[in-house]
Image (cartoon, rainbow, N blue to C red):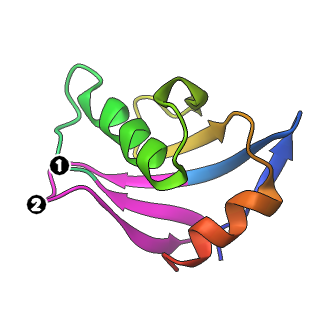
Amino acid sequence: MVELREKNGNVVFVVKAHPRSSKSRICGVYNGGLKVSLKAAPVDDAANKECCELLSKVFRIPLSRVHIISGNTSRTKTVMLEGISSVSAAPVLESYC
């Protein structure tokens, strides 16, 4: 299960990214975080942008409400989704676990 935290009414969780995959998708859970495969390479912030776009589609929220708050240059990132509580994020992520 993905460990969800709530910060000022926004959900925060860890994402383990694997760039240069054959396609972008959510793979499941990894050490309490969400494991994602990204088609983009980790060059010029392309993988981070693709990670945000993927989460935006999964949670059906605008891209402007998805933020990487730490780990921009790491495979392990902390992501915040604005305006979504941990209670409403849990069922969405549960379908991928």
Task: Check if mark 1's residue and mark 2's residue have beta carbons within 8 Å.
Answer: yes
| Nearest the eye: 88 or 81 | 88
| Type of amino acid under label 1 | Lys
Dominant SS type (magenta): strand
Determine the residue positioned at 38% across, 47% down: 54
> Which residue bears the numbered disc 2?
22
Residue 36, horizontal then vertical, whole percent = 37, 59
Residue 80, horizontal then vertical, whole percent = 65, 38
Which image quadrant is residue 72 in? top left
Q: Give the range drawn in magenta.
A: 15-37
How would you rate the neighbour count of disc 1 (Cα within 10 Å): few for under 14, some for 14-19, many for 20 or more?
some
SS under mark 1: loop
In the image, residue 92 above or below residue 7: below
Which image quadrant is residue 68 in? top right
| Alpha-carbon span between mark 1 and mark 2 | 6 Å
How would you rate the neighbour count of disc 2 (Cα within 10 Å): few for under 14, some for 14-19, many for 20 or more?
few
Q: Can residue 47 be seen in this view?
A: yes
Residue 66 magenta-drawn?
Answer: no
SS under mark 2: loop
Residue 39 disc label: 1
Which image quadrant is residue 49 in? top left
| Type of amino acid under label 2 | Ser
